[in-house]
Image: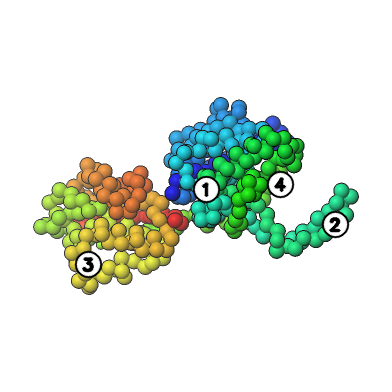
Amino acid sequence: MHVTAIIAAGGRGARFGGDRPKQLLTLAGRPILQRSVDAFLHSDRITDIVVALPPELAAAPPAYLRGAAKPIAIVEGGGRRQDSVANAFARAAERADVVAVHDAARPLVTADVIARTIDAAAEHGAAIAALPATDTVKRGDARRVIVDTIPRTEIFLAQTPQTFRTAVLRDALLHAEALAKAGALAGADGDATDEAMLAERAGHHVHLVEGDSRNIKITTPEDITVAEAILQRGARPASTGRAGTGYDLHRLVEGRALILGGITIPSERGALGHSDADVVCHALTDALLGAACLGDIGRHFPDTDGRWKDASSLDLLRRAVAMVAEQGLQVGNVDVTVILERPKISNHVEAVRAAVADALGVDVGRVSIKGKTNEGVDAVGRGEAIAAHAIALLRSR
Ligand code: MG
């Protein structure tokens, strides 16, 4: 499913004062806009991104919007929010099945909230993140006298993303344009404050999915203080990873192949073991299992079990990847240090990286393999053994 994110950052933040667009103000050291865009760059549900910026910013966009890991298109925003979204939608990939519109002023949106709106929009046509009201809601008149009390169970506070099947959002925008041309809904009442309103007016059913209390909108300087407190609490589990370490050592003997990451390294001596004695795969398998609190390689692939006697260690690593995937985790990156007196492995590092990346199902850019000697010290230094240390970072899928 091709999902395009539209980040609406066309406004200037009048309620903030000052002449700097509020989306460029920093929140715990990084611009609000960058944090909002990053949330969608890091979501594995998003294919590409269109950012609507004020004209002067669109002409000279910040560096973090260029050279990102996913395609980012930049368009000029319009006078009203719906104009910005219409401009961005015109640039949204024709291939998009679903479009998620997000307010740049909500930099703390989580991957889970993004995914919920996408799933619901794909199923129903339109869905927004929202929170049930917790306060009692009153309707007041011009004198600020209560007219009535609205049943709280009927009240939801809209957040973003607001997500639509492409055809639904196209219809909503065309409908809004037609109404504007006809002169209906002129003035403040006619300007939609969110995209759901456009879809509702066009007769579409918009579903409510669970938002997140941390997904606050930065409207005033006080909101920055609140957002920084939320970040400091580390209250974003979807963005934090789980780290695990692994270590392995095998004796080196003549008459054995030296296998690292499934690659045979030309060597006079090879690692002795029940299996292929691949220290890179063994240390990495332990790092993955450790990060997911799933025990260790000896528990899942005991060398007393004949099934694993001639198993490729690369295959055991693939099984560990599948086990952590069942826990909702995927590999972020790994780093391995191989300690070996001789031969030098530098000429083989790229082949090992490629093989390990393939087994992990990640880009080679997420796999680091380093070699070093033990400076002649201890058994490893005397060439009697090979060792490896590994660290793995796992992320929520
Ligand atoms: Mg081992």
Please name whichever residue, 193 or 314, is drawn nearer the observer in this view of the structure. 193
Q: Earlier in the sequence, mark 1 or mark 2?
A: 2
Is residue 251 in view from this perspective?
no
Q: What residue would you read off at disc 1?
A: 165
Q: Indicate the amino acid at tag 1.
A: Arg
Q: Is residue 219 above or below residue 269?
A: above
Q: What residue would you read off at disc 2?
A: 147
Residue 10 location, x and y as percent?
Answer: 62, 35
Please name whichever residue, 173 or 159, is drawn nearer the observer in this view of the structure. 173
The residue carrying pointer 4 sits among few (fewer than 14), some (14 to 19) or many (20 or more) residues within 10 Å by Cα, namely: few
Q: Indicate the amino acid at tag 2.
A: Val
At mark 4, the secondary structure is helix
The residue carrying pointer 1 sits among few (fewer than 14), some (14 to 19) or many (20 or more) residues within 10 Å by Cα, namely: many
CB within 8 Å, label 3 to label 2:
no
Q: Indicate the amino acid at tag 4.
A: Glu
Mark 3 or mark 1: which is in front? 1
Q: Residue furthest bottom?
A: 304
Is residue 203 in view from this perspective?
yes
Gap in angstroms between the C-alphas marked 1 and 2: 38 Å
Q: Earlier in the sequence, mark 3 or mark 4?
A: 4
Q: Earlier in the sequence, mark 4 or mark 1?
A: 1
Q: Indicate the amino acid at tag 3.
A: Trp
Q: What residue would you read off at disc 3?
A: 308
